[in-house]
């Protein structure tokens, strides 16, 4: 086996592992959103939101001194928006489940 084949196998493994982790986070969000109390379902979206600030801070610290002020602001905004895609996804799952739960409770009454 040459190094190209090994790198390809490792790449496939990493993608597979990433997909499994995404599935675990979605399953956990579905479980937490389906709880009786509304607070557990907000844990993962809030955690992702906080981590998006850490991502922007870390990236800007790493890229310190590169680009002008406008470039740094736009880059930070773009990184913030991209890093909040998981926040938006998890929040949509949460609000979808909560709305469905409200609808089901109203139909029972």
Image (cartoon, helix red, strand yellow):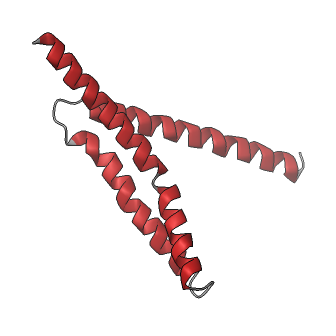
Query: For this rendering, which residue is in front, 78 or 54?
Result: 78
Q: Is residue 106 left or right of residue 31?
A: left
Q: Position of residue 13 (x, y in %)?
A: 67, 41
Q: Position of residue 69 (x, y in %)?
A: 54, 84
Q: Residue at x 27, y 39 (%)?
A: 41
For residue 55, above or below residue 100: below
**Residue 15, image x, y percentages:** 65, 42
Q: Residue at x 30, y 29 (%)?
A: 97
Point out residue 22 in the picture as x, y percentages from the top left corner. 50, 40
Q: Quadrant of the N terminus?
A: top right
The quarter of the rendered structure image containing the C terminus is top left
The tally of labels here is 0
Give the residue furthest to the front.
70
Quadrant position of residue 47:
bottom left
Considering only vertical position in the picture, is 96 above or below 108? below
Question: Front-most of 28 and 82?
Answer: 82
Q: Residue furthest bottom?
A: 65
Q: Looking at the picture, does residue 59 appear above or below residue 44?
A: below
Residue ID at (23%, 41%): 40
């Amino acid at each position: 086996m040459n190094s190209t084949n090994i790198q390809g196998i490792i790449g496939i493994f990493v993608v597979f592992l990433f997909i499994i982790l995404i599935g675990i986070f979605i399953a956990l969000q579905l479980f937490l959103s389906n709880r009786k109390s509304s607070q557990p379902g907000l844990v993962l979206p809030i955690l992702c939101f906080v981590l998006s600030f850490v991502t922007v801070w870390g990236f800007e610290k790493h890229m310190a001194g590169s680009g002008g002020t406008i470039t740094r602001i736009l880059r930070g905004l773009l990184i913030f928006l991209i890093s909040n895609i998981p926040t938006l996804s998890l929040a949509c799952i949460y609000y979808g489940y909560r709305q469905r739960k409200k609808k089901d409770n109203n139909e029972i009454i």
